[in-house]
Image (spheres, grey):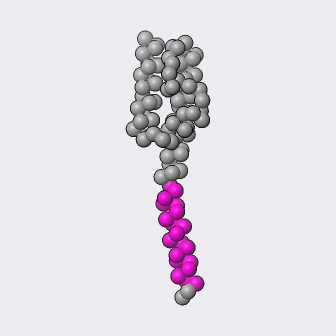
Amino acid sequence: MLKTMSWAKAGSAAGLFMLASAPTAFAQANCEMYAKLAVQQQRQNESSKCDLKGPDWSADLQGHMSWCTAASPQQWQAALQRRKQALDNCGK
């Protein structure tokens, strides 16, 4: 009985760890995607000679990752949308 309880507790602890780490892994994957898209948008800014400037306009992948990890999903989605809008307006 003691061995069974130990394994049950270990299984519960492992399950809780996996549940707790799942949102973190999901957020990490989202930030990796965000950072790659942000760098692509900066490259488009440069290649299109839009001359858009500011902290949003950087080719620093790690800088975008760091910002994203402190931002809410709504914030990083809005940043992507702002850059897209600016790039779309540049081409007009």
Image quarter hosting the C terminus: top left
Q: Magenta includes 69?
A: no
Q: Is residue 43 above or below residue 32?
A: above
Q: Quadrant of residue 60?
A: top right
Q: Is residue 78 above or below residue 9?
A: above
Q: Tell me where residue 39 appears, x and y as whole percent.
A: 56, 28
Q: Tell me where residue 44 appears, x and y as whole percent.
A: 55, 20
Identified at 42% across, 25% down, the residue is 82
Q: Could you say which is closer to the camera, residue 72 or residue 14?
A: 72
Identified at 51% across, 25% down, the residue is 55
Q: Is residue 26 above or below residue 83?
A: below
Report the magenta stretch's main SS: helix
Q: Residue furthest bottom?
A: 1
Q: Magenta includes 4?
A: yes
Identified at 45% across, 39% down, the residue is 71
Q: Tell me where residue 88 appears, x and y as whole percent.
A: 44, 18
| Residue 33 seen in the current view | no
Q: Could you say which is closer to the camera, residue 91 or residue 10?
A: 10
Q: Quadrant of residue 46?
A: top right
The stretch in magenta equals 3-22
Q: Quadrant of residue 10?
A: bottom right
